[in-house]
Amino acid sequence: MDLGLKGKRVIVTGGTRGIGAAIVSAFLAEGARVAFCARSASEVAASQAAHKAAGHDTIAAAVDVSDAAAYTGWLSECLEALGGADIFVPNVSGGAGPGEAGWKSVFEVDMMAMVRGADLILPHMAKAGGGAIVAISSIAALEALGGAGPYGAMKAALTSYASQLGADAARYGVRVNTVSPGPIHVEDGYWGMVRRERPELYKGAVARQPFGRLGTTEEVAACVVFLASPAASWVTRANLVVDGGFSQRVQF
C-alpha cells in the first residue's frame, strides 16, 4: 500500500530510542522528511549519523521537552526548516517516577509537550489545509496496571485531550488520534530491564500475551505511520490499541 507520505513533513519527539526511534525510521522509509529530538546530545548525533548512512537527511536536536521555552523554540525552528508540518507525533514520556516529582515530570513531558506542540503546530497545519497528529498513549490509560500513579493517569488525560482536540481540529482538516501500546520489548528500555532484573515478571507478561511474546517497536511504528497517513483519511479521535491482545476488556 502506498501510504502517500513521500515528502510529508514530520516532527517527532523522543526519536532516538525505543518506539520513537522506530517511528522516525518508519517515516523515513516512506520518504517523509523528519525532524526529531531527544534529551541526549550524543544519542541525537548517533541517530542522525545512522540515518545519514542509510541515505536519509534529518533535522535533529537535543531538547528537553519539559523546558517550555527550549521546546517551543525548537518546534519553531523545525517549522521554519521544513516549511511547515504535515504530521506531529508527541512520543516522549516522563515515565512513572516516584512522589510529587514524578507527577510533575509526566505532566510536563507527556501532557504539556502535546498541548504546547499542538498549540504551535496546528495553525500551520490549518494554513496548509490539513494534517495529522498522533500522540503516543498507553494501555495503562485504560486499565489498572502497576498500581496508582502518574503514568496511567496522565496517559488517560492525554487520550481524552487528543479526542477533544480532534473534534476542534476537524474544521481545519486536521486529524488527531492516539496509539496505545501494550508491553513492548525494548532491550535498553523498561521491559528489557524487567527481563534482566525481574525475569519472573517478564515471563508473566509473556504468558498473558495470546501470541506468547511481547510486541516490537516496529509493530507500533507501523500503526502510527498508517494513522498519520492519507490512507487513514477518515480516522480521527480514535485510540488504537496495539497490544497483541494483552488487554482483557472488549474493545468497542
Image (cartoon, rainbow, N blue to C red):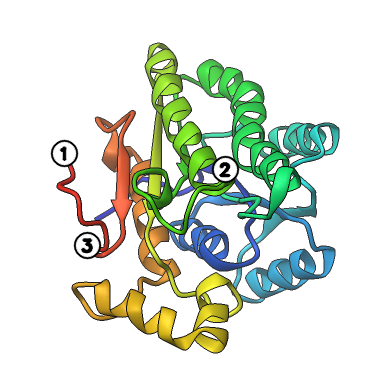
Please state the horizontal and vertical placement of residue 57, each as a whole percent of the image. 66, 60
Q: Is residue 198 left or right of residue 179?
A: right
Contact? badges 3 and 2 (CB < 8 Å): no
- Residue 245 is marked as 3
Q: Amino acid at mark 3?
A: Gly
Give the labeled residue for mark 2: 90
In space, the residues marked 1 and 2 are separated at their CA atoms by 25 Å
Q: Amino acid at mark 1?
A: Phe
In this view, 165 is above or below 78: above
In this view, 199 is above or below 26: below
Identify the image quadrant of residue 80: top right
Give the labeled residue for mark 1: 252
Give SS at disc 2. loop
Task: Indicate which label's residue lies in the foreground, 3 or 2.
Answer: 3
Give SS at disc 3. loop
Residue plotted at (27% across, 33% down): 235
In space, the residues marked 1 and 3 are separated at their CA atoms by 14 Å
- Which residue is more in the foreground, 182 or 149? 149
